[in-house]
Image (spheres, rainbow, N blue to C red):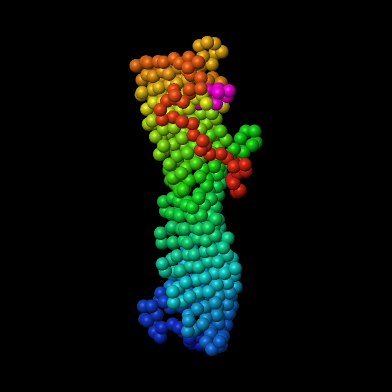
């Protein structure tokens, strides 16, 4: 454009982009005015009977707080639709969207981008095959190979809707989150995220997978399934699984109505009638806290209707050592249960294997019971307060194990198992 002809330039701008007749009118309606700030040349022609105006070369356009640059802008005068090609950049305050080509809809202040989109707001970088951004109410929609990267994680999905004003987003369709810091991958069908509170919720068959490298070089996998999976990134980072929770990792497995995982504290809180299996031991109660040290189970605290079953002998799979009480603490060694402390209305039933005529079972109750285990069998037992006991000889106990079982305890068969192969994409610690 010939910049020595300012009058011609002004007339061209007003004609091309439909500005108001006076400066006062333009100021009053500045949010609706489509302004051409720069172009190397202007052309006027007809396409399918509709007048079209074309700006070519170093094109710079704006409408309100939306700023657009590209190589070529082709505006259909009657519809207010402008086709933008070549190095397209759309800016709205701190948000920048880039694409090879796109369309801008003047009436509803809406920009579309095609053939690969990159959006960056200084904190998050998003890429997709297609993008759409509405300047008011500042909502973005993206689809096709959507990928979002921030300082904490990477998210991929089929589509994403981003609400700029509330900093909330919804990702849908084959959603996958990779968190390298915690070595966690979460998959599901729908992700809701609030950037202000750092809260996320995964829906539609969410699965959490965590892999850690053992000193031997092998990888140990934790898999958690539930109806809802939530993540909190605040002073205490944690994942919360809700409804039909199923947990499995090597010899440790569990089911519960709710589970909270503290990624830095190496602990798991289980609520709503949880059941945990470790080796040949089954633990149940109203709620329980599971504590690990370097991913090894070390302690389980059970609160309310606490009970534990342990297979007492491989030759007698139907025989279970049993203990119940109001609360219970189980302590584990490297490979097996080593101690059980039971408080309040404590009852213990355990089998005796001494290859003597005194074989059978003992049933003992008291205010408190402390049991020590060795090789999976009871090695010592101490009862405190209100002690009562019963001994049943082998000839009466044989084949009548269920008659002597403690009420409310039964070995469950719904223990979760690891798949033959870990789900694809699991992150592994270095």
Segment colored magenta? 310-317
Residue 169 seen anywhere in this rendered image of the structure: yes
Q: Quadrant of the N terminus?
A: bottom right
Residue ranking furthest to the right = 217
Residue ranking furthest to the top = 357
Q: Quadrant of the C terminus?
A: top right
User: Residue 246's x, y, as percent?
Assistant: 50, 41
351 vs 119: above or below: above
At 48% from the left and 23% from the top, the residue drawn is: 401
At 53% from the left and 58% from the top, the residue drawn is: 173
Residue ranking furthest to the left = 386
Residue 428 seen anywhere in this rendered image of the structure: no
At 50% from the left and 74% from the top, the residue drawn is: 104
* Residue 24 lies in quadrant: bottom left
333, 343: nearer the viewer: 343
180 vs 300: above or below: below
User: Residue 105's x, y, as percent?
Assistant: 48, 75
Magenta stretch encompasses residue 315? yes
384, 234: nearer the viewer: 384
User: Residue 216's x, y, as percent?
Assistant: 64, 33
349, 271: nearer the viewer: 349
Principal secondary structure, stretch drawn in magenta: loop
* Residue 403 lies in quadrant: top left
At 55% from the left and 80% from the top, the residue drawn is: 74
372 vs 151: above or below: above
User: Residue 119's x, y, as percent?
Assistant: 53, 63
């Amino acid at each position: 454009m010939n910049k020595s002809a300012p009058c011609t330039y002004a007339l061209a701008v007003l004609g091309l982009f439909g500005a108001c007749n006076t400066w006062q009118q333009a100021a009053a309606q500045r949010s609706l005015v489509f302004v051409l700030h720069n172009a190397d040349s202007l052309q006027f022609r007809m396409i399918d009977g509709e007048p079209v105006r074309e700006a070519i070369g170093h094109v710079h356009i704006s409408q309100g707080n939306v700023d657009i640059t590209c190589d070529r802008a082709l505006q259909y005068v009657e519809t207010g639709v402008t086709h933008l090609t070549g190095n397209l950049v759309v800016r709205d305050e701190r948000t920048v969207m880039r694409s090879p080509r796109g369309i801008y809809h003047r009436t509803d202040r809406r920009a579309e981008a095609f053939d690969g989109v990159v959006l960056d707001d200084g904190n998050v970088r998003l890429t997709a095959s297609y993008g759409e951004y509405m300047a008011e109410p500042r909502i973005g929609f993206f689809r096709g190979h959507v990928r979002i990267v921030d300082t904490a994680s990477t998210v991929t999905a089929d589509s994403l809707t981003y609400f700029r004003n509330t900093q909330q987003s919804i990702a849908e369709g084959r959603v996958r989150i990779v968190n390298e810091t915690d070595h966690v991958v979460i998959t599901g069908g729908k992700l809701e995220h609030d950037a202000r509170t750092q809260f996320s919720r995964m829906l539609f068959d969410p699965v959490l997978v965590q892999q850690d490298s053992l000193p031997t070089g092998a990888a140990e996998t934790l898999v958690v399934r539930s109806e809802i999976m939530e993540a909190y990134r605040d002073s205490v980072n944690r994942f919360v699984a809700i409804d039909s929770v199923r947990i499995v990792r090597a010899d440790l497995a569990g089911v519960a109505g709710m589970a909270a995982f503290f990624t830095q504290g190496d602990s798991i809180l289980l609520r709503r009638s949880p059941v945990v299996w470790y080796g040949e031991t089954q633990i149940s109660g109203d709620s329980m806290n599971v504590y690990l040290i370097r991913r090894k189970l070390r302690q389980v605290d059970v609160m309310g209707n606490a009970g534990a079953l342990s297979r007492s002998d491989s030759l007698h799979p139907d025989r279970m050592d049993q203990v119940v009480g109001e609360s219970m603490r189980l302590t584990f060694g490297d490979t097996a249960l080593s101690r059980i402390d039971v408080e309040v209305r404590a009852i213990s039933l355990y089998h005796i294997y001494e290859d003597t005529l005194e074989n059978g079972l003992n049933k003992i109750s008291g205010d408190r019971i402390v049991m020590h285990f060795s090789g999976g069998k009871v090695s010592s037992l101490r009862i405190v307060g209100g002690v009562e006991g019963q001994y049943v000889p082998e000839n009466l106990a044989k084949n009548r194990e269920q008659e002597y079982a403690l009420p409310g305890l039964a070995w469950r068969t719904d223990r979760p198992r690891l798949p033959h192969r870990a789900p694809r994409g699991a992150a592994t610690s270095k």
